Image: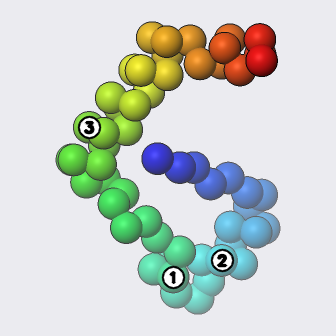
Amino acid sequence: MSAFSSTPEIWESMMSPNPFIHTTTTGGGALACAAAIAAIRVVLRDNYAEQAREK
């Protein structure tokens, strides 16, 4: 599970002229999405953010 964010200028420089240069290997795949949802549920259920703050 990962994420990418950027400014519009950086995004355009990566996507031009070929929009298929920067893609994901499992983007939109049902199994990958199910695994991501399961992982997010565990992170929220076990309150990992609060545990990290305490450490």
Foreground tag (3 vs 1): 3
Secondary element type, mark 2: helix
| Amino acid tagged 3 | Ala
From the image, tell me which residue sits under label 1. Answer: 21
The x and y percentages for residue 48 are 59, 19
Asked if labels 2 and 1 touch by Cβ distance under 8 angstroms, the answer is yes
Which residue appears at 36% of the width and 57% of the height? 27
From the image, tell me which residue sits under label 3. Answer: 34
Instruction: Count neighbours of disc 1 (C-alpha within 10 A) and say few if under 14, some if 14 to 19, many if 20 or more.
Output: few
The x and y percentages for residue 41 are 40, 20
Q: Residue furthest bottom?
A: 17
| Amino acid tagged 1 | Ile
Asked if labels 2 and 3 touch by Cβ distance under 8 angstroms, the answer is no
Residue 12 location, quadrant = bottom right
Instruction: Count neighbours of disc 3 (C-alpha within 10 A) and say few if under 14, some if 14 to 19, many if 20 or more.
Output: few
Asked if labels 1 and 3 touch by Cβ distance under 8 angstroms, the answer is no
Which residue appears at 67% of the width and 52% of the height? 5
Q: Nearer the viewer, residue 55 or 24?
A: 55
Residue 14 numbered mark, or none: 2
Which residue appears at 77% of the width and 11% of the height? 54
| Amino acid tagged 2 | Met
Give the mark nearer the N terminus: 3 vs 2.
Answer: 2
Give the alpha-carbon distance from disc 3 to disc 2, as whole Å.
Answer: 28 Å
Foreground tag (3 vs 2): 3
Give the alpha-carbon distance from disc 1 to disc 2, as whole Å.
Answer: 8 Å
Query: Please, is residue 8 above or below residue 21 in the view?
Result: above
